[in-house]
Image: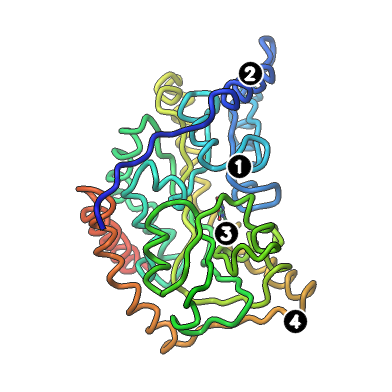
Amino acid sequence: MASRTAPRLALPLACLMACAAWLAGCARDDGPIVWRFAIEETRGSVQDAYAQAFAEAIEARSGGRIDVKVYPYGTLGTSDQITELLHNGTLEFATASPGHLGKIIPELQVFLLHYTLHDDEATNSRALADPELRAFFDALYAEKDFRLLDFVSEGLMVWTTRGPVRRPADFAGLKMRVMTSPLLLAAYDAYGADPTPLPYAEVYSALQLNMIDAQVNPVFAIEEMSFYEVTDHLVLPGHAHFVTSVMTNQAFYDRLSEGDRRMLDGVIAELHDEAFAIQRRFNQERLERMLERKPELEVLTLDADERAAFRAMAAPVRDLFVEMAGPRAEQALTVLDAAVERAARSE
Ligand code: 6CS
């Protein structure tokens, strides 16, 4: 596959100006300084719990001098639109998942490769904080005027489907909704599926209207977005983990006083393990909740042989990633593999 040029950020001008004007109107001259934090998930999600913990810590440590306002998904637009608002300085903080941000920073799509992260979630969480991995991606974010603050793991990716899926052949012609980064098309093409990129907000109605047959997300998201209502099987293939990034506008970060920068960096470092604990709890609790509400939901955990069949078909996608994601893609893969290995050794 030929390498693709990363598309420009493209929020329609009228929408961008309306959001900027509205957000500017929310700031008060005489009140505390406002830091705006937009998340790609709704209230009650892992990202919401993270942003609320961030807000609490910053407000307490700044003695009320800084007020953090959290904007959940749905208030400011799609993931791409949130990224653009951060880019132009309308927002100070945002979450941005490789599944969408991979269109802007193609090397990030390394986190979307199947059977590449470690099976053990705690190992992955340590790998995401690996200093060499962080240094590599820090530079890529900086090239786009973003400052990467952290990578956060939100749990195992799970397929929700109408029919049972146990082997790659079950994917033949199946319309699988994926996030909008191009690597995800290659990942599901490899299984023979018909991958369909859509923004998060459109997934429920696309399932309901039979425009797609399946989607993939962590358990907590499947519960909170009610995707289980419009699908019948919950398939645990152990193929991928949902990773997001927390980022700020580089110019905003550079303007902070040294003290505020230290406070911010300290809060972010402390939240890494807390985020991991939050996602663990949310994913466990929400699975129980879904099964209470819909006991007929069938949970299929693929066994070692079934997983091996998917793993074999996913392997060539690593080469496709290297072709698609530009000259530093191979390095991204080496850096991630090494970080996972170091994390596994440091158990
Ligand atoms: O599937 C998506 O598009 C979204 N899924 C999650 C769990 N978080 C944000 C992302 O945009």
Per the model, the C-alpha gap separating discs 3 and 2 is 37 Å
> To which residue does mark 3 refer?
277
Q: In this view, does 219 lie above or below 66?
A: below
Q: What residue type is labelled 2?
A: Ala
Cα–Cα gap, marks 2 and 4:
48 Å
Q: Where is residue 128 in the image (x, y as percent from the top left)?
A: 39, 54
Q: How many marks?
A: 4
Quadrant in which the N terminus appears: bottom left
Query: Does residue 232 lie above or below 201 as drawn?
Result: below
Q: Which of marks 2 and 1 is nearer the N terminus?
A: 2
Q: Name the residue under label 2.
A: 21
Rounded to the nearest whole Å, what is the CA distance between mark 2 and mark 1? Answer: 23 Å
- Expressed as whole percent of the image width and height from the top left, the position of residue 289 reads 75, 69
- Disc 3 to disc 2: CB gap under 8 Å: no
Q: Is mark 3 within 8 Å of ligand 1?
A: no
Q: In this view, does 150 lie to the left or right of 209?
A: left
Q: Which residue matches tag 4?
A: 296
Question: Measuring 67% from the left and 82% from the top, which residue is drawn there?
Answer: 298
Element at badge 1? helix
> Which amino acid type is shown beneath numbered disc 3?
Ala
